[in-house]
Amino acid sequence: QVQLQESGPGLVKPSETLSLSCIVSGASISNSYWSWIRQSPEKGLEWIGYIYYGRTANYNPSLKSRVTISVDTSKDQVSLNLKYVTAADTAVYYCATRLWDRHSSSWFWFLDSWGQGAQVTVSS
Amino acid sequence: DIQMTQSPSSVSASVGDRVTITCRASQGIATWLAWYQQKPGKAPKLLIYGASTLQSGVPSRFTGSGSGTDFSLTINSLQPEDFATYYCQQGQGFPLTFGGGTRVEIK
């Protein structure tokens, strides 16, 4: 069973960079897709983007100019960096895996295992 | 972006009731739709994918149906642990998008 654990600063100043880590256990970090999603009362659930180890990344166009997702295989860690944050970036941030359906042996773009979430507040 | 619209935004029900939640996509998504359950302070949990396939371990009282633009989630014989917020999500194209949620409350 995949387990994900987000961590990072709970408070970030406006215009600075939000940096979060997601520690992965129970799965090969190099053999799966890793997404970041955030949730706020204002915007609800918002998909930020995904990375497939060292090969492919895809970001939400609404955030693309500010976001980077990366993988560190030596630490079994997926990272999120979001630059130039504002109060609108205040949210709970989750990492999650893409669903692998064993019955059809296919990847689906639904989100299977999630971390517990990390609250990030942007404020001076 | 594909917009996902859920209704109602909230519903009050009693234990044992049947509850149906609907989700409409702004364009056809075949059966590329999932439903999640979220309880306060917890991450969303995948219940149903492919519009009607129950995720492993999810009770059979949860059923999903629909295709194209109109989908529904039905909870048969509501149990105390089912009081939560439910979200739909389209997996047809990027960016992945979610509905606004339906809160199932105790009557």
Image (cartoon, coloured by chain):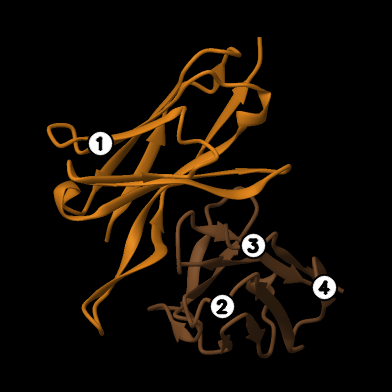
Chain colours: A orange, B brown
Q: Please name the residue that numbered disc 1 is placed on.
A: A77
The percent coordinates of residue A113 (x first, y second) are 38, 58
Q: Is residue A101 above or below residue B75?
A: above
Q: CA distance from mark 1 to mark 4?
A: 39 Å
Label 1 close to label 3 by CB (< 8 Å): no
Q: Quadrant of the C terminus of chain A?
A: top right
Residue type, numbered disc 1 = Gln
Decide: few, some or many residues near mark 1? Use Cα within 10 Å; few <14, some 14-19, many ≥20.
Answer: some
For disc 4, the marked residue is: B11
Instruction: Give percent across and percent down for residue B44.
Output: 53, 58
CA neighbours of label 2 inside 10 A, class few (<14), some (14 to 19), many (20+): some
Q: Earlier in the sequence, mark 2 or mark 4?
A: 4
Q: Amino acid at mark 3?
A: Gln
The N terminus of chain A: image quadrant: bottom left
Residue designated by label 2: B28
Find the distance from the CA under tag 3 to the CA under tag 2.
11 Å
The tag earlier along the polypeptide, 3 or 4, is 3
Q: For mark 3, give the secondary structure.
A: loop
The numbered dot on residue B3 is: 3
Q: Chain of mark 1?
A: A
For the residues labelled 1 and 3, the Cα–Cα distance comes to 32 Å
- Check disc 4 and report its element: helix, strand or loop: strand
Q: Give the quarter of the image for residue B85.
A: bottom right
